[in-house]
Image (tube, grey):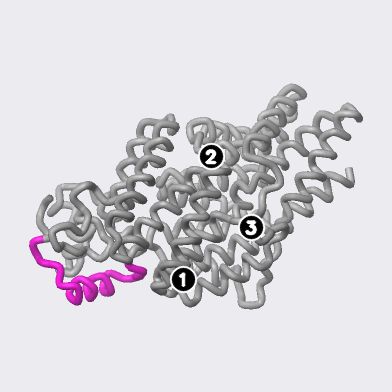
Amino acid sequence: TTLELLGMASQLNSDLVTAAACLQEAAATFRQLDDPEGVAASLGSLVVCAATHPHDLSVPGVSLAEAIEAGQTAVMVARAVGWQAGEAYALASVGLGFGSAGDYGVALEAAREALRLAQEIKHPQWVILAHRALGQLYLDVLARWLARSHLEEALEILGEVGSTVWKGYIGAALAAVYVALGQLGQAEGILCGLLTPETPARTGWERQLWAAGAELALARNEPDAAVPVVDRLTASTPNLGAEGVIPRLWTLRGRALAMLRRYEEAEALLQAAADEAANRGVPAWELRAHLALGRLYRAWRRQARAAAEFGAGRGIAERMAARIGDEGLRSGFLGQLTTLLPAAGDREAGGQDWGGLTRREAQVATLISLGKTNREIAEALVVSERTVESHVASIMGKLGFSSRSQVAAWVIKRGLGRDEGGQG
């Protein structure tokens, strides 16, 4: 119907409030027409109107609870009439809904089933959709290499599909994963092929590309480049009133201002982001905001406040971990948290200052300054090479560097002792 098309068009143009209204009315119309496929399609599309990924830069048109309920109904309706394409679409969408709510066990199961169905019926668009959903879910639970694998596979399939929309969404998601892994050159390479200074910030995929560019700028310690991008995204957000808060945008701007030592402004933004994420029931963004606040207070030399924020982040992360069904993923998530959250003995007590790094990261940084490879560092610290890779990525992200030589120069300038290179 025209309503469904208007809903989809509004959604693609980041107006989730209008999109939700159209899609809800479309679903009701399809019910009156006894058209189950139309009902399933409309309700499946309604899920992302809760500002789930890839629309986490928009004002939500429905609550997360309403979105998940709509997605579950879409799955049941499509399954009841044997419409596998509709079922795959709804499963991928509701998987992102459950993921936004922090229910990662259910989310991953839905996204994996979506991928299985899409591959079985040879539906390339929904295969890409399922890979994108899995990529985002794995990024949320810090399984970054799995996220990269799914998104790179989606990018390869795109060579056959050739969709500008999908290229934008997948490219932005993959660039964000590369940044999280510390692979900044690869992130730049993918964004350079999709983003130019003339690119608008209107559609969902354009906005995701710009946000990924801001993430890259922050990883390179270029907050002055990130701030105008975030400001542009904020100014072009439909339905954003004076009191509105977009957790992802507020967190990005808060991080940039913290790097510019505009601490009070950053504090207000990050606290607002944490509060809004908590109100919406989106733990991944609540965690990111608290971690950013912890790093802000560390830089501001407010250690008690930093400890409180890291403690809040740890509590959120532990609740997230409890809802990751796969034991290996759960263990990996908790292990990766050590690269993001300082342990009890890692605070700058006793005059020791690691510039925002944990003690283990300081050890890794010192060994990098001595010219050690990741394998040699792993042997010295008695950990896996992959663990070292994660530490290196975290160090790069925290310090805003893109090369090991920058880390080495920072260690020498900071005066970290060579004794940090030992086991501990």
Residue type at tag 1:
Ala
Residue at 83 percent of width and 50 percent of height: 6
SS of the residue under disc 1: helix
Is residue 116 found left or right of 307 in the rendered image? right
Q: Earlier in the sequence, mark 2 or mark 1?
A: 2
Number of residues whose C-alpha sits closer than 10 Å to that of mark 2, classed few (under 14), some (14–19) or many (20 or more): many
Name the residue carrying label 1: 217
**Quick check: 82 above or below 231?**
above
Q: From the viewer's perspective, is the residue at label 1 or at label 3 nearer?
A: 3
3 vs 2, front mark: 3
Residue 256 % position (x, y): 45, 69
Q: Secondary structure at mark 2?
A: helix
Q: Which residue is mark 3?
A: 243
**Separation of residues labelled 2 and 1 (CA atoms):** 27 Å
Amino acid type of the residue that numbered disc 2 sits on in the rendered structure: Gly
In the picture of the structure, the residue carrying the numbered disc 2 is 99
Sequence-wise first label, 1 or 3: 1
Q: Amino acid at mark 3?
A: Glu
Report, in whole angstroms, how far the alpha carbon at label 3 lies from the one at label 2.
26 Å
Whether residue 38 appears in magenta in the rendering, the answer is: no
**Quick check: is 412 in the magenta stretch?**
yes
Q: Residues within 10 Å of mark 1 (few under 14, many from 20)?
A: many
Residue that sits furthest to the top in the current view: 80
Q: Quadrant of residue 84?
A: top right
Magenta segment range?
A: 399-419
Question: Which image quadrant: the N terminus?
Answer: top right
Name the side, left or right, on which 192 lies relative to 13: left
